[in-house]
């Protein structure tokens, strides 16, 4: 099976086709390509796992600061979650 290209495409359209044969807006001479804003991207499973790991570390350090006294685990986690979310939002 071979790939066919459109015969009636303009030179600009042909220039914007990458090696994969698909339109690549970054190579187009008539449009300015900008990456989508980070807020508009869907979080991935890796993002979620990294966030959870950051929260766990922050919660551990909070528990360590209070001498690992029992009974405050939920408060440590929630405070760490707020801290990490604020950090990620500002990045």
Image: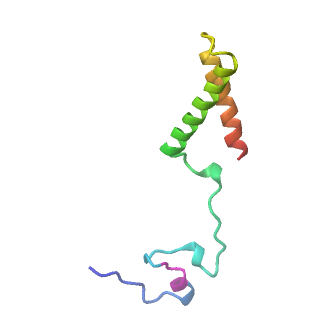
- Position of 47 relative to 84 (above/below): below
Task: Name the residue rendered at 65%, 21% in the picture.
Answer: 64
Query: How far across and down, in percent of the image, does residue 18 sit?
Result: 49, 78
Answer left or right for 10 relative to 38: left
Q: Position of residue 63 (x, y in %)?
A: 64, 20
The picture quadrant where one finds residue 65 is top right
* Above or below, 87 relative to 31: above
Bounds of the magenta segment: 13-18
The image quadrant of residue 87 is top right
Q: Is residue 85 magenta?
A: no
Q: Position of residue 59 (x, y in %)?
A: 62, 26
Residue at left 65%, top 18%? 75
| Horizontal and vertical percent position of residue 36 | 62, 59
Residue drawn at the location 64% of the way across and 80% of the way down? 30
Out of 4 and 86, give the one closest to the viewer: 86
State the residue lying farthest toward the right. 90
Extreme-left residue of the structure: 1
Q: Find residue 27 and report its image quarter.
A: bottom right
């Amino acid at each position: 099976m071979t790939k066919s290209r459109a015969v009636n495409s303009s030179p600009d359209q042909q220039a914007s086709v990458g090696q994969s044969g698909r339109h690549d807006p970054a190579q187009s001479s008539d449009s300015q390509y900008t990456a989508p804003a980070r807020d508009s991207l869907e979080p991935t499973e890796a993002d979620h796992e990294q966030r959870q790991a950051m929260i766990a570390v922050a919660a551990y350090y909070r528990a360590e600061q209070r001498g690992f006294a029992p009974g405050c685990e939920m408060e440590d986690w929630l405070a760490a979650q707020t801290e990490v979310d604020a950090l990620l939002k500002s990045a």
